[in-house]
Amino acid sequence: DIQMTQSPSSLSASVGDRVTITCQASHDISNDLNWYQQKPGKAPKLLISDTWNRETGVPSRFSGIGSGTYFTLTISSLQPEDIATYYCQHYGRLPAIPALTFGGGTKVEIK
Amino acid sequence: QVQLVESGGGVVQPGTSLRLSCTASGYTFSRHGLHWVRQAPGKGLEWVALIWYDGSKKFYGDSVKGRFTISRDNSRDTLYLQMDSLRAEDTAMYFCARLLGNIVDYWGQGTLVTVSS
């Protein structure tokens, strides 16, 4: 089974700071990596698919990069509305079980 | 617009059963696979189960295999999760989520299941 390891588990930064979250896969997953944002009490929201494709309406300050086993999500200038927990996620492909494998999450707070 | 609305959560005792529902609207239900994903209080996201668009294939996470059953009724635009032999560790918010290719593009708001004696 593929394991997804996110770091850090939490971070505190100032408004305007550049923030980077990393996600490492236990095996090569090509670019099959998505990022979700979850605000307290809400469902997760898809931010970036296939490593770097920003979803419609997602601000350009969010960007993703990576391939193989190492991926990053960057917020170029942290805003108060970005306070949330961020999850990376891989989707298995047949013949493997097409499970959703999530990283442990990174909680982003304002300093 | 696409909407997924879960229902059926509640407080139950260990060893009992519960059935969750997820009613969809705003798209052609029978064209998309659907997942159940859960989140224990204060914890991360855990995949529970997946059903193919036509119900022909079903997959389960190891922690629920043999106890939970995913199903769907495409005539009612509804997804189900039958949960048997419930344990305290099944306590979580349960989300249904739509599959689009290899991404999950829409999520419901969740229904809370609490297993406690």
Image (spheres, helix red, strand yellow):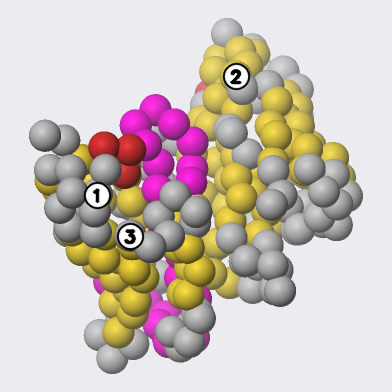
The percent position of residue B116, horizontal first and vertical second, equals: 16, 35
Crowding near the residue tagged with mark 1, few <14, some 14–19, many ≥20 C-alpha atoms within 10 Å: many
Contact between labelled residues 3 and 1, with CB atoms less than 8 Å apart: yes
Q: Residue at x 26, y 65 (%)?
A: B82
- What chain does badge 3 belong to? B
Q: In front here: A75 or B59?
A: B59
Residue matched to label 2: A10
Residue matched to label 1: B86
Q: Residue at x 20, y 63 (%)?
A: B19
Q: Residue at x 81, y 55 (%)?
A: A29
* Residue B30 vertical position relative to residue A17 in the rendered view, above or below: below
**Amino acid type indicated by mark 3:** Arg
Q: Secondary structure at mark 1?
A: loop
Contact between labelled residues 3 and 2, with CB atoms less than 8 Å apart: no
- First of labels 1, 3 by sequence position: 3
How many numbered discs, if any? 3
The percent position of residue B44, horizontal first and vertical second, equals: 49, 36
Is B11 magenta? The answer is no
Q: In front here: A91 or B85?
A: B85
Q: Residue at x 69, y 41 (%)?
A: A4
